[in-house]
Structures are given as structure tokens and as C-alpha cells.
Amino acid sequence: MKPQVRILFYSILFFLYLTTTTILLTVGEKLKTDPYKTLGCGFAILNLIYAFVALKWNVLLNIICSISIAALSLFLALKFTNLHLVIDYDPYQVKTAIFANAVFSIIFWEIVYQVKIRR
């Protein structure tokens, strides 16, 4: 895949992460579930769609990578917000967690892509 196409897919994925977060949290409130589980499942589904549309790899590899990237990026985003680096600009650390989750997901997708093409 050309770098321009990957950048386009990552930009779309970043935008989708930012826009679907509030929708997923609203769905979680209506279902009365844990917000982290709702976000994790929602991001895993978003990653699955990305993997099947953009990467078109093996089905099992798509599923494993999608779920692991969603879980790992959500975990690291929460740990990143606990550092309180931008507490002056984002007092509740919500925007920081959303942006960190999106950035970590894109970084992990690029790592997985680079490992896959090198093999």
C-alpha cells in the first residue's frame, strides 16, 4: 500500500475515533454498561472494519490485531491521562484520553503493517 493511501486511511480512522467516542459513550449510558467495555468493543468493531476494508489480510489476523490494538490503545490512553500533562488545557482529561486513544491506535496499526510487510 502506498504511503499516501495509508495516510488517507489513518486520517479517516483518526476522524472516526474522534467522532464515534461520544456516540459510543451515549450507547453505553443507555445500555447501562461500563464505559470502558463499551468503548473497547466499539473501537474493536471500528478496527475490524478498518482491517477488512483497508488491509485485507487473513481473517484471523484481522480479528486478533483489531481486538488487541483496541484494548492496548484504550489501556495506554488511560495511563497517559493519569500523567496529567495538559491539566491546564483539559482539566477533566477527557479530550486527552480521546486523542491519545486515536493516536495510539494509529501508531499500533502502522507497527502491525510494517511487521506484516517485512515478513
Image (cartoon, rainbow, N blue to C red):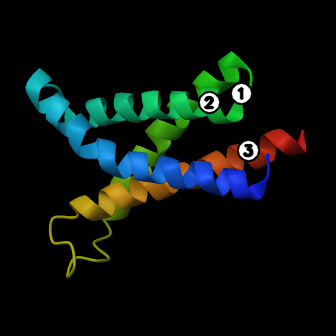
Query: What kind of element bears circle 1?
Result: loop
Q: Which circle, 1 or 3, is nearer the viewer? A: 1
Q: Quadrant of residue 3?
A: bottom right
Which residue is denoted by mark 2 in the rendering?
53
Q: Position of residue 23 (x, y in %)?
A: 23, 38
In what quadrant of the picture does the N terminus appear? top right
Residue at position x 85%, y 42% in the image: 117
Judge by depth and name the residue closer to the eye, 92 or 16: 16
- Circles 1 and 2, Cβ within 8 Å, touching? The answer is yes
Q: Are marks 3 and 2 in contact (CB under 8 Å)?
A: no
Residue nearest the observer in this picture, 21 or 93: 21
Residue 42 in the image, given as x and y percentages of width and height:
36, 31
Q: Is residue 9 left or right of residue 103?
A: right
Residue type at mark 3 is: Tyr
Amino acid carrying mark 1 in the image: Lys
Q: Would residue 25 be visible to someone looking at this image?
A: yes
Return the residue at label 3.
Answer: 113
Reading the chain from its start, which is encountered first: label 1 or label 3?
1
Q: CA distance from mark 3 to mark 2?
A: 14 Å
Whichever of callouts 3 and 2 sits on the residue coming sooner in the sequence is 2
State the separation of the CA atoms marked 1 and 3: 11 Å
Question: In front here: 6 or 79?
Answer: 6
